[in-house]
Amino acid sequence: MAGTCWCGRSESGICVGLHRFSEEEYQAFLKEKKPFSEETLQEVKQQTQQDEKKSDMPVIYTEERVNEIIKNFQNLLMEADNFPRDKNPNDYRPFWSGLRGAGSSLLGLTNHLKSIIDHQQKEKSK
């Protein structure tokens, strides 16, 4: 479920999450990484091109990222459900912060999946 790299940092052309690095972290990563062999690069690029021909919808969420988003939101819900009754009910900050992080990621994933469904329905109706 790997998507095409949109930040330009992945030498294979496949998104591996390098867009999450700050510029400083990315430069440190470049210094430490081992380069791909030319043969491996060509294989990955060919596979990416074949995958893109199958669908004109970009896949921007890896399976790992999808699972991470879902797990983070499940954990937030579990924490809210297990909130001690003897604590101050106005102590909502951890949940508010969680919703701003995990909730916005879940909303982004949901919007992306909806756009894929809409695109597939549009293609079927042609």
Image (tube, grey):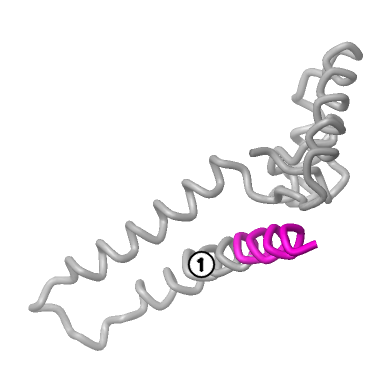
Q: Residue at x 88, y 11 (%)?
A: 39
Could you tell me residue 49's position as x and y percent?
87, 33
Which of the 4 quarters of the picture holds residue 76? bottom left
Could you tell me residue 77's position as x and y percent?
30, 66
Q: Is residue 115 left or right of residue 110?
A: right
Vertical order, 42 against 79 (above or below): above
Q: Residue at x 63, y 61 (%)?
A: 117
Q: Nearer the viewer, residue 13 or 119?
A: 119
Could you tell me residue 15's position as x and y percent?
74, 41
- Magenta stretch, main secondary structure, is helix
The amino acid pointed to by label 1 is: Gly
Vertical order, 54 against 43 (above or below): below
Query: Within 10 angstroms of label 1, few (less than 14), some, or many (20 or more) residues?
Result: some
Magenta region includes residue 120: yes
State the residue lying farthest toward the bottom: 90
The magenta region covers 112-126
State the residue lying farthest toward the front: 126
Q: Residue at x 34, y 58 (%)?
A: 74
- The residue pinned by badge 1 equals 101
